[in-house]
Image (cartoon, rainbow, N blue to C red):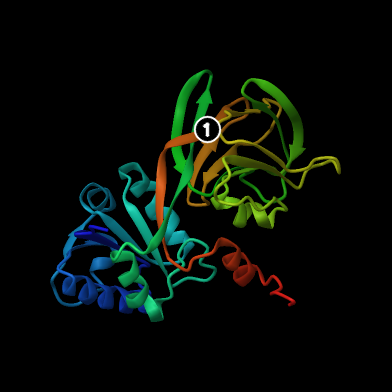
């Protein structure tokens, strides 16, 4: 597929990930690729034959990025790499591996097919988040999986209103709200009782967190909608909004949170035998064929 410059991103201080990275460097050099290793994991690697750079530099120079680790490592890299439209593939050295789907014990065979162009590609959309206070932008960030508004303390309720394209949807007293992409529908949202959205859907799920009413239910909406959350000024404590559980932004009573589709997209590459429903069956322990 014309991959000449390849970026490597790894799980820091992880023996298995370091072994895979060392093997990848040898593999890629044998394919005459220019190899750039992300600086936070480069110090753990021996030998030479590779350059060292930050994620943004990898994004601007690489044709392909290989992430070695778990889905958390993929999410952190994806938020940066998506801005540069770099093709990304994941080698699973984590636990679940919904996004990092290449087996580290068989990576050479699977990467061979990808380099030969015999693979699957897909685009996953991201979210962008803005926090406004008194009409002025206070902070912004992006998310691959989900944006979560939550309390800074455990088991504390908050009050807020939700609007969709300026249409009032509901007011709620709960522990918070999860706004998840299809990619994130198998992550925190799933644990909160949200629906699984197949990756090809252009949709978002809004999942209440421990609502103070039995009638509150998750709702699936058009991903091209703008979600606006008005935090009630009656809340007594400061709140938080997080992106992929990695980035936490402060929210005060009376603030407004705007969530919309990010123009950047994550370009994922899968081996040719990748099947989303097989991933669900494997990771979630679903039953196999009866006949």
Which residue appears at 68% of the width and 57% of the height? 191
The vertical placement of 254 against 65, above or below, is: above
Q: Residues within 10 Å of mark 1 (few under 14, many from 20)?
A: some
Which residue appears at 26% of the width and 76% of the height? 22
Which residue appears at 54% of the width and 51% of the height? 183
Q: Nearer the viewer, residue 49 or 197?
A: 197
The vertical placement of 165 against 270, above or below, is: above
Quadrant of the rendered image containing residue 139: top left
**Count of picture labels:** 1
Is 201 left or right of 272, judged from the image as shown?
Answer: right
Is 219 left or right of 25, judged from the image as shown?
Answer: right
Is 182 left or right of 122, judged from the image as shown?
Answer: right
Looking at the figure, which quarter contains the C terminus?
Answer: bottom right
Q: Judge whether residue 38 can be spotted in this image.
A: no
The vertical placement of 18 against 237, above or below, is: below
Q: Which residue is mark 1?
A: 260
Looking at the figure, which quarter contains the N terminus?
Answer: bottom left
Q: Residue furthest right?
A: 214
């Amino acid at each position: 597929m014309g991959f000449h410059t390849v970026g490597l991103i790894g799980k820091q201080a992880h023996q298995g990930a370091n072994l895979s990275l060392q093997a990848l460097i040898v593999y890629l050099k044998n394919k005459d690729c220019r190899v750039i290793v992300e600086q936070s994991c480069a110090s753990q690697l021996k030998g030479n034959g590779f350059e060292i750079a930050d994620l943004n530099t990898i994004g601007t120079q690489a044709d392909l990025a290989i992430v070695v680790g778990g889905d958390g490592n993929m999410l952190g890299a994806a938020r940066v790499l998506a801005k540069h439209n770099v093709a990304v593939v994941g080698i699973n050295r984590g636990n679940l591996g919904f996004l990092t789907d290449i087996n580290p014990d068989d990576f050479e065979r699977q990467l061979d097919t990808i380099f030969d162009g015999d693979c699957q590609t897909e685009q996953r959309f991201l979210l962008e988040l803005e926090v406004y206070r008194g009409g002025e932008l206070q902070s912004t960030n992006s998310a691959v999986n989900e944006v979560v508004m939550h309390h800074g303390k455990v088991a504390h309720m908050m009050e807020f209103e939700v609007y969709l394209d300026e249409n009032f949807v509901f007011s709620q007293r709960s522990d918070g709200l999860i706004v998840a992409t299809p990619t994130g529908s198998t992550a925190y949202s799933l644990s909160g009782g949200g629906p699984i959205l197949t990756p090809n859907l252009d949709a978002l799920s809004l999942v209440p967190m421990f609502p103070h009413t039995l009638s509150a239910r998750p709702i699936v909406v058009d991903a091209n909608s703008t979600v606006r959350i008005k935090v009630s000024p009656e809340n007594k404590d400061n709140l938080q909004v997080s992106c992929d559980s990695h980035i936490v932004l402060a929210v005060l009573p009376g603030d407004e949170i705007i969530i919309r589709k990010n123009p950047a997209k994550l370009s994922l590459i899968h081996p040719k035998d990748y099947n989303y429903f097989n991933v669900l069956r494997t990771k979630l322990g679903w039953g196999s064929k009866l006949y």
